Amino acid sequence: MRSGKKGITAYLKESAAARFLAAALFAFAGVLALPWMFAPDGSSLGYTNSVFSLLLFLAFFWLWNRILRTGFEGGRRRWTLPLCLGAGFSFAMVFGAQLDQRGRVPFQNPGMWLCLLILGVLVTLLIRYFWDRLYDWLMGRKEKCFGMEERIREAAGSKGHGSFFLTVGIIFLCYLPVFLAVYPGFFVYDAQDEYLQVVTRSFSTHHPLMHVLLLGGMIHAVYKITGSYNLGIACYTLFQMAVMAGIFGWFLEKMKKRGMAGWCRILCALYFGLCPVLVMFSLCSAKDGLFTGMLLMMTVLLQELCADAEKFFQRKGEPFLLAASSLGMMLLRHNGFYGFLVFIPLAVLYLKGKRKKVFLYFVLIGAVYMLMNGGLTRLLQADASENQEMLTVPISQLARVYGDEKEALSEEEKELLFRYLPQEALERYTPKVTDGVKIDFNNAAFQEDPAGFFKLWFQWGAKHPFTYLNAWFMTSYGFWYPDTVIDVYRGNSVFTFTYGDSSYFGYEVEEPGVRESKLPWLNECYRKLSLEITQQKIPVVSMVFSPGFLFWITAFFLGFLWYGRWGRKAFPFVLPFLIWLTVILGPTYLVRYVVFLWAQLPLLLWEVFGAGEMPEQGAKGEAQI
């Protein structure tokens, strides 16, 4: 402490009686507030009038006594990141429970805000405690670096690509049984629409044109030669399997050069080859698998750029590979460009020594992307008149206000609304997915008078701010609430089935393809993973499949890296975070939009646990915890 007075944490550390009292108060407050994370009002007698609440109190008392006995060192700045993460997680859990079970957040409920305050404080303390202990453990593990320098030298001196091809082969072989089980592959998520654009030569920018040409062109070419749609789909699936296995193999070669041990690389290879989420999208025709691979490559290469920009630009292949992966990422998903655009100034500010060169490099990549994308649009005479993808959140908000306040709206307001959104489209509004409304958005009217649309949107937002927030949260909470059951398409009929309790993955083969399983038992396993809540009934295991859980695990370890002053390790992950910010502005929450969280997890864990680099210089006082 700067003053001569003893801090509260130091006092509690020394005084057993005061510490026991504080631990008891914290434990009781936690028992009172915790139910709001799992139930709308937290008042169920099954919890409050139960011996379970007493056992929970005793467990909390033991934990808080231990935390307070350990104490906290450092100034106020050491609390900034734990406070941000603790408050964010508390809001996510409480709001998520309300949205999941009630379809809205009761913003005017004072009890909810009181419990949020309690939970925010307690979770902040827990995060700070665990970050401190993790930091101490890492700094005390001298042996964690044992043999690393030798492995780095061996990797640098090794010749040939035997281990690369072996790794790629292992991952590809892991994919093969699933490919045979779901033959010809998962041809789903707008796959038919993309293929028909190629067949009819009627293109639009609704889907990335590069992926439309790649998917549709390959399938149609094989069909022309063989007369089999299934064989065309299978060829594309095998192509994507090979690309994804190659990217994961390349990643593990990079990790080998950074000193990752052989046993760890084997575990990572098995993870990439067997993790159901990664397998699903490596065998899926949707653009999300390839996008994930490009983003992983970008993150790895951005780490090398941040580590030493001068050396990075002196290498022959690395700048080209980063540019190629950046272009691939942006050409495969429109939101990749928006994330990249915001990342440019952040990267320039962070990389102080090479700002001009980094700025020109990234701007050149962005310019090449715009030329390529614009060139494809003009060459294919693609329809670029759609605006609804960028207006997804405003559309859902207007539709929710119309649904909730229909009788109170004036005829003039309704008439203006119907100009952009037909009444029959508004009647199809469902809180968790905006597709049914935005599909009939009147682009011609919007292009003629966009000001009228935004004027109505601002006016209604001022009158119904909580309705707007609830509308947005309902289409995005699955990305940040770990306990979500993804059932956004419940009741929707597609080509071969009607969605029920789960919309985790599309699973099917859209026309003109047909499922011809060679391993029916394995096919049934993936059907259950995709369309039933089987895996979500298993405690702990269910979190492995949760987008919200993966997000908070990522946030926890990234926050720790910043907290420990490992900025060079953490900064490259800013780009995936920016991509995540774009998906919460999308039409709904689906695993496909955030597959990259699963792919980047081994890299993040390696940065936390694998390397022995000390905190960065320049913040000496703050680097000490």
Image (cartoon, rainbow, N blue to C red):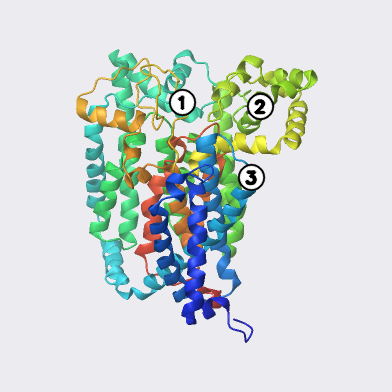
Vertical comparison of 139 with 174: above or below: below
Percent position of residue 591, x then y: 43, 37
Question: Cα distance, mark 1 to mark 2?
Answer: 21 Å
Q: Which residue does the numbered mark 3 point to in the structure image? A: 109
Q: Nearer the viewer, mark 3 or mark 2?
A: 3
* Kind of residue indicated by mark 2: Asp
Question: Cα distance, mark 1 to mark 3?
Answer: 30 Å
Q: Which residue does the numbered mark 1 point to in the structure image? A: 489
Q: Which residue does the numbered mark 2 point to in the structure image? A: 404
Vertical comparison of 440 with 266: above or below: above
Q: Is residue 471 visible?
A: yes
Confirm or deny contact between disc 1 and disc 3 (CB under 8 A): no
Q: Earlier in the sequence, mark 3 or mark 2?
A: 3
Where is residue 1, by image quadrant? Answer: bottom right
Vertical comparison of 233 with 138: above or below: above
Which type of secondary structure does the marked residue at label 3 adopt? Answer: loop
